[in-house]
Structures are given as C-alpha cells and as structure tokens.
Amino acid sequence: METIRFAIEDGIATLTLNYPERKNALSIPMRGEIGEAIRQVRADESVRAMILTGAGTDFCSGGDISSMQVEIDAPQGRRRLQQAHGWLEDLIQLDVPVIAAVDGAAYGAGFSLALTADIILATPRARFGLPFLRMGLIPDCGVFYTLPRMIGVQRAKALMFSMRELDAEAAQDLGIVMEIVPEESLAGRAQALARAFTEASPVAVGLTKQALNASLNQDLHTMLAMEADGQGIAFSTGYRREAADRFMAKQPLRYRWPG
C-alpha cells in the first residue's frame, strides 16, 4: 500500500487516504489500493466496523486532475470508472457499519466517497462540494445513488447544478453530517463509535444495514418479509440469548451507543 494506510485491529478496519501533498486526491493507483483494502475487509470475519479518513488536513479533494489531462475516448472513460464501481458497490453493501471521519476538503469524488459511509463525522473546517460540471464532467463514484436517498432529489439536483460548497453546519442541516466534532477529537470520536459496534451483534447489525439499504427500492410487502426473515435469524443467535439473560439478571447489556 503506497497511497493509503490500512490496518485491522481489535475488530476495527481503518482506511486512511495517504496522499496529503495532493489533498488525498483519488489517483488511479489509490483507487486500486482502496479496492484491495475493501476486499480484505469483506474477507475478514473479525471486522465489526470500518473507518474512512484522510491523512493531513483534508479528507479527499476528488479525482486527481493531473490524470484528467490525458486524451481518452468514451469507451476508455467508461471503463476507467467501472474499475472503481466494483469496490464502491462492495463498500456501500458492506455488512459492517462504515464511519467517515471528514476534515477539510471533501470535494467531487471525495464527497461521493464520504457518502458511501453509514455515519459521517465532520470537523468545523470540513467542506463538501460537487464541482464536476465546472470540468465538463458529471458527478460520479455512486453519488447519483447515495445523495438523493439522503437529502431528496431536488436538493441533490441543486447541489450538483449549483456546485455550491457546504460547510459542516450546512451539511449537518441537510442530514449529510451526523455530528460535528473538533479537529482534535475527530479520530477519537470515530474510534469510539467503531468500538461500540464491536460489542454489538454482527448478525443484527448486518441485517439492519441490509434492510435499510434495500428499503427505498422495495415495496411494503417485501420489506415486511425481509423484516420477518431477519428477525427470525436474529432470534436464533447466541448473542440474543446472552442479551436476554443479561437483561433478566439486571446486568449491563454489551452494546451501548457512546454519548
């Protein structure tokens, strides 16, 4: 790994974009290494949560502009993006929660990458934007799927067409950012949330995330069936039986959301 730092420790996978001299721009080599890291997360049953973050003072400034100076035709451009789509889909569909810890710039594909997370934390100096049209490009890296589901189609159109930059508070008001934390507390807060999931039922967490990901594409009947099937599986786990025993014995339950 030359463009990212990646580690799995105590059930938490941490992927850090490590190209600070270019504000962690998504170079072609970096995209390949992100894909490899996500494959490792999917294959490791010990992982209970994943943190996405950036080295230095920025999360990700988007695509590497220097790589856009090369003349390519439409089929080449299509294939170039499709290479990232495989791991983007895997990232969105991960059974474990993904936490994006955003400091500084999250522009273009960097904003799109943050939106693949289940929880977005941001510092007061975080900035979000989709300036694709300025370069004669369309928004990419899954943002046509993630953003409208988060803030609605009209607001997504407004952000894409206007290329408006959002500060952390504006992003929180739209429902994009869950919490704003000081720069010095960002890593610690992301770790605290990730550690909480290491004490949760991986089966129940995974089933909950799968159902939520499917909910906007399915009808009521399908979602009720998914709910019943998932609850049946959750009821059968040792974790659920232990939790019931702890509750009846008035002992603390393992999973608690950190305040």
Image: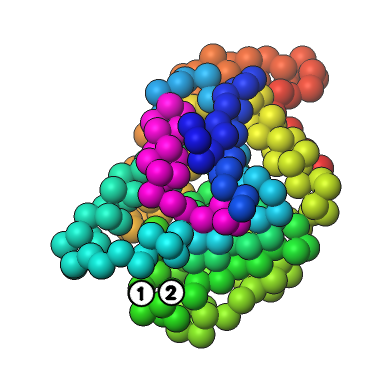
| CB under 8 Å between discs 1 and 2 | yes
Q: Number of callouts in the render?
A: 2
Quadrant assignment for the C terminus: top right
Q: Position of residue 3 (x, y in %)?
A: 51, 40
Q: Is residue 192 above or below residue 152?
A: above
Q: Secondary structure at mark 2?
A: helix
- Tell me the magenta residue range: 22-41
Disc number placed over residue 242 in the picture, else none: none
State yes or no: residue 230 in magenta: no
Q: Give the residue displayed 66% in from the left and 34% down from the top.
A: 194
250 relative to 107 in the view: left or right: right
The numbered mark, 1 or 2, whose residue comes first in the sequence reads: 2
Is-magenta flag for residue 37?
yes
Q: Which residue is mark 2?
A: 132
On screen, 128 above or below 226?
below
Residue that numbered label 1 is attached to: 137
Residue 114 position (above or below residue 236): below
Of 79 and 186, which appears nearest the observer?
Answer: 79
Name the amino acid type tagged 2: Phe
Viewer-side residue, 230 vs 12: 12
Crowd rating for badge 2 (residues with CA inside 10 Å; few <14, some 14–19, many 20+): some
Residue 253: x and y in percent read 73, 24
Distance, label 1 to label 2, CA atoms, is 5 Å
- Tell me if 190 is positioned left or right of 141 in this view: right
Residue 49 shows in the view: no
- The quadrant holding residue 148 is bottom left
> Of helix, strand and loop, which mostly describes the magenta segment?
helix
Which x, y percent locates residue 41?
46, 29
- The amino acid beneath tag 1 is Leu
The residue positioned 56% from the left and 61% from the top of the image is: 61
Q: Residues within 10 Å of mark 1 (few under 14, many from 20)?
A: few
